[in-house]
Amino acid sequence: MRLLATIGALAIVFGIGIAVFFFGGYYSVAGTAEDPAVVTWALTKVRVASINRHATDNPPASFGDNNMVQAGAKAYASNGCANCHGAPGVMWLKYSEGLHPDPPDLKKVAGDLSPSQVFWIIKNGINMTGMPSFELAGAKDDEIWSIAAFVKKLPMVSEADYKSWTASAEPKQ
């Protein structure tokens, strides 16, 4: 019984210490400050678990066909995705280097995500990363699915193809 009381007291002291650290302003929210390893670990685990749990929409039957991928490239360009994530022959803009955490290079991570996960991320965004919700920005599901189809093909898209697919893309206001 004494052991349980000691463990309970330590848990309370630990909880108070954590609360003072975060709510007392000792934890820096500056974009230039590196997160403690435990915070990075926890946020990554929460993000991955949340995406895995919520990404349940099935892709449309046309997912991945050439027309959808090309429409997705155009939507990717007009929605400003290349600004943070780059594209074939297009470097991300300098300001994206100030985002914390860094936006992922989609050519490298697209293969690790299912179409449903890519769709969910684009549709809903991710808190505390700078990734916006395209749904809240006015994108419809068919446009989001086309962007997801493009992202899944992104590692195999040539610079020439991307430029021809996006030549008429105009930035959205």
Image: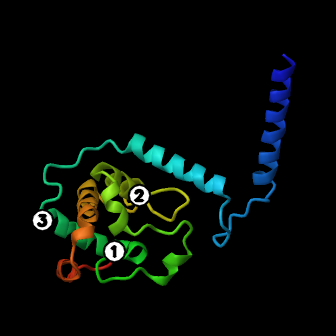
Q: In the rendered structure, are the residues bearing label 1 and label 3 in contact, judged by CB atoms less than 8 Å apart?
A: no
**Which quadrant would residue 58 be assigned to in this image?**
top left
Q: Secondary structure at mark 2?
A: loop
Which of disc 3 and disc 2 is earlier in sequence? 3
- Reading the image, the residue beneath label 3 is 66
Q: Secondary structure at mark 3?
A: helix
Q: Secondary structure at mark 1?
A: loop
Residue 17 location (% of width, % of height): 82, 46
**Label 2 CA crowd tier, 10 Å (few <14, some 14–19, many 20+):** few
Residue at 85% over, 30% down:
9
Residue 135 seen: no
Q: Is residue 90 above or below residue 7?
A: below
Residue at 54% over, 71% down:
99
Q: Amino acid at mark 1?
A: Lys
The image quadrant where one finds the C terminus is bottom left
**From mark 2 to mark 1, how far is it between C-alphas?**
14 Å
Q: Amino acid at mark 2?
A: Leu
Residue at 79% over, 59% down:
26
Q: Amino acid at mark 3?
A: Asn
Q: Tell me: 32 left or right of 115.
A: right
Q: Tell me: 60 left or right of 114.
A: left
- Reading the image, the residue beneath label 2 is 136
Instruction: Work out whether residue 166 or residue 116 is closer to the camera in this orientation and state it.
Output: 116
Q: Is residue 122 above or below residue 156?
A: above
Instruction: Work out whether residue 161 or residue 139 is closer to the camera in this orientation and state it.
Output: 161
Residue 170 location (% of width, % of height): 28, 80
Residue 37 location (% of width, % of height): 64, 57
- Reading the image, the residue beneath label 1 is 172
